[in-house]
Each structure stands twice: as C-alpha cells, then as structure tokens.
Amino acid sequence: MAYEKIQADLKSIIEEWITSDYLREGELFVLGCSTSEVTGKDIGTSGSEQIAEVLFDEMKLLQKRTGVLLAFQCCEHLNRALVVERETAARYMLEQVSVVPVRHAGGSMASHAYKHMKDPVVVESIKADAGMDIGETMIGMHLKHVAVPLRFEQRNIGNARVRAARTRPKLIGGSRANYEDTRLNDTCN
C-alpha cells in the first residue's frame, strides 16, 4: 500500500474536519485505528508502525490547526485504553493505568503514539467531544453522549472504512423546553 495514498486520504478527511467547524480548542478527539485494516487485512493481523507514523503525523497537523487534544485508542487486548499526553490526563482528571502499548497488545497506532508523544500516559477511559474510527475499532465507548455521526465525502483510508462523529449536549426538559440555541448546531427531531 502506498503511504502517499494513505496520507492523501487522511489529509482529505482532516480538511473535512476543518471545514466542518465542529472542533474547538481544548476538546478531546479520540482516534481508533487498525493499521491492518488500512492495508486490507483483518483487524489485528498485520499492524504497521510505518502506516501508524503516516497517520500520527497527519493527526498532529489536525491538532496544530484546531487545538484539539488527541487520544489514541489501544486495541481490545488493553481494553481499549487510551494514550494521551500527561498534561491532558491532568487537565481532565483522567485516571492513569500501568501499561505500555506494543504492536501486539495495544496496536501499532497506540504503540507509535506512545513512543512519539512528548510525555505520554495511558488512561482507562475518556469522554471525547469528537473522534474518528479507522477500520472499525469501536470508539463509541469513549465519546460523550450524544454522538452525532458525520458523513464526510472521504470514507476510506487505504482499504479501511472510516467513521467520524462529533457530540452534542443532551436535549432535556421535554415539550416545554426550548432547543433553539444556534450554538447547539443540531435540532431535535
């Protein structure tokens, strides 16, 4: 698989994130990624640090352009724990766990992130404001309620399907409540 194609696919999705205007500085953004799926293999069978490097570098550009705080989800062997910067864990009072992700227990993406972040730690869970799932790694458990799926034009990175979501506050209060605050960017059906 050509790294340039993978990079171009992710660049397209990042541009869609940027133009969507859903991301705000300081918000948590979770990335789940199967580098095996990107190459067209079954999840967990052919992890690639080289693909993880390409994706990590592009995600760091998303972070730079939007100010989001990145969280990289580990695989199921580490109960989908997340790699974040120590500063992020402290800011959001996230409980650190003792583990170092590696390719076969954590996955190539989380392993690469752990090796290349400034001061990484692993936490058990977060409640992210937005996220992206590359290769059906199931990030939903780490998104705030209510998750709103996004349908970007670019739907694949390499051979992996991509799903993206943002969150919005819960609508509460029943029939007498007013939901017409334009800042919610969503309507109740």
Image (cartoon, rainbow, N blue to C red):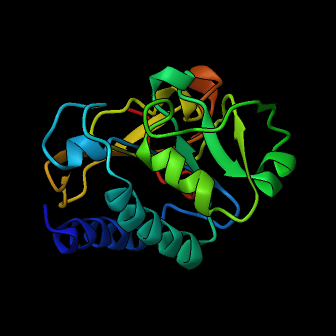
Q: Position of residue 171 (x, y in %)?
A: 58, 31
Query: Residue at left 39%, top 29%?
Result: 138
Q: Where is residue 136 in the image (x, y as percent from the top left)?
A: 29, 33
Q: On the rendered structure, is 148 left or right of 16?
A: right
Q: Quadrant of the N terminus?
A: bottom left
The residue nearer to you, when weighing 66 against 34, is 34
Query: Residue at left 45%, top 33%?
Result: 139
The residue nearer to you, when weighing 96 against 138, is 96
Q: On the rendered structure, is 159 left or right of 123?
A: left
Q: Quadrant of residue 32?
A: top left
Q: In which quarter of the image is residue 169?
A: top right
Q: Quadrant of residue 99?
A: top right
Q: Is residue 180 visible?
A: no
Q: Position of residue 135 (x, y in %)?
A: 27, 40
Question: Is 119 drawn above or below residue 164 in the view shown?
Answer: below
The residue nearer to you, when weighing 159 against 68, is 159
Question: Is 85 drawn above or below residue 177 in the view shown?
Answer: below
Query: Residue at left 36%, top 67%?
Result: 54
